[in-house]
Amino acid sequence: MGCWPIAGMTSVNVNDKDSRATLTAAFESGVNFFDTAYCYGANGESERLIGEVLGANREEIVYATKGGIHWTEDRQRVHDACPDTLKAECETSLARLGTNHVELYYLHAPDPAVPIRESAGAIADLIQAGKVRFAGVSNVNLQQLRDFQSECPVTAIQPPYNMLQREIEAELVPYCLAHDISILVYWPLMKGLLAGKLKRDHVFEANDGRAKYPMFQGTEWRKNQDFLDELRTIAASIGKTVSELVVNWTVQQSGITAALCGAKRGEQITETAAAMTWKLTPGQLQQIDEAITRRGAVVTKSAV
Ligand SMILES: NC(=O)c1ccc[n+]([C@@H]2O[C@H](COP(=O)([O-])OP(=O)(O)OC[C@H]3O[C@@H](n4cnc5c(N)ncnc54)[C@H](OP(=O)(O)O)[C@@H]3O)[C@@H](O)[C@H]2O)c1
């Protein structure tokens, strides 16, 4: 489960009571991997909720968090991946999560002001100190991944990837397959678009963070809805929901280890978790691929 929406920073109508219920529903649906970050919430709300709700089942759960981005008091996002900052943020994340280590700790994104090797060195030190089991790096290109690896072995990368954003297939996927690096993808549901429930005439609330992305506006929005109609037909023909279909397709792509699905309600994560229990057939995968080809992949700006 991707734990950005429960931070309530860009998702509308989020509150702690619902977020606790969402985390519980995830665990009860068989989800055992929770992805969060130091900057998910102005004050670590996402990490705190995870620690509070899932702490009793810590032994059964994989915690993945990230450092290197924080918010100022007036809500400006700051990239700071200096070694000292990363180490301090990791300590804070552990305290919020109520744990003495996390399984996976990512550099959230390269800091243009800090050589990535220095950031990687800090995470190598955190592994050495037993606070982190494995290192990851998010939002990198191939050269940055290689540079990071020269200081710290990389277990996982975390790039954006979904049916409409497939840039990683060119270089990162083949490299990770060749080097045994896991790929945990974010935005598999394209921020809810590919869950298929936003209607053509949906009006985004003013504080809904998605409204600013081209994918949710004008011609792109209309093309996406035409594409979704195709997915809706395929999903209905096999008795699945669109989000189940999308997540199942995602984890069947070459090199993809896991899909990090965000949710702000229990029923959402229960639905996406159901995608873990069955497999699209080669014929169904081909039908979906043909629909994607008709839609055409789109390049959008990444999250960070
Ligand atoms: N490394 C990075 O820089 C980075 C960047 C972005 C995300 N991430 C990670 O990746 C995760 C996934 O990204 P995301 O959460 O932004 O987007 P996402 O998983 O693509 O979409 C999540 C949103 O989709 C909607 N949704 C989910 N399941 C649904 C269902 N079954 N039915 C209907 N709607 C459903 C909900 O939004 P509504 O109910 O509001 O429609 C939910 O908040 C994050 O939570 C985070 O852990 C990492």
Image (cartoon, grey):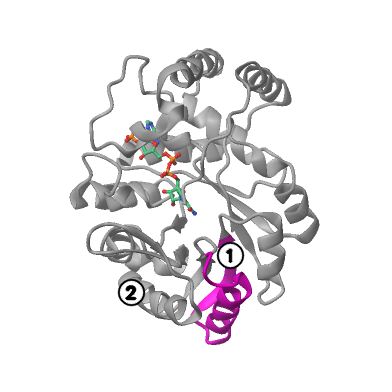
Q: Is mark 1 within 8 Å of ligand 1?
A: no
Spot occupied by residue 140 in the image (x, y as percentages of width and height): 61, 56
- Res 242 seen here: yes
Q: Where in the figure is residue 254, as x and y percent of width and height?
A: 72, 42
How many labels were placed on the picture? 2
Q: Is residue 34 above or below residue 147?
A: above
Q: Residue furthest right?
A: 178
State yes or no: Cβ of the residue under disc 2 lies below 8 Å from any atom of ligand 1: no
Q: Which mark is residue 136?
A: 1
- Looking at the rendering, the stretch of residues picked out in magenta corresponds to 112-137
Left or right of 99, for residue 187: right
Q: Quadrant of ligand 1?
A: top left
Q: Residue at x 53, y 65 (%)?
A: 106
The picture quadrant where one finds residue 49 is bottom left
Q: From mark 1 to mark 2, how far is it between C-alphas? A: 21 Å
Crowding near pointer 1: few (<14 within 10 Å), some, many (20+)? Answer: many
**Mark 1 or 2 closer to N-term?**
2
The residue sitting at 33% across, 76% down in the picture is 95
Q: Label 2 crowding class (10 Å Cα cut-off): few <14, some 14-19, many 20+?
A: some
Residue farthest toward the front in the current orientation of the protein: 113
- The location of residue 231, given as percent across then percent down, is 54, 18
User: Could you tell me residue 268's position as x and y percent?
Assistant: 36, 36
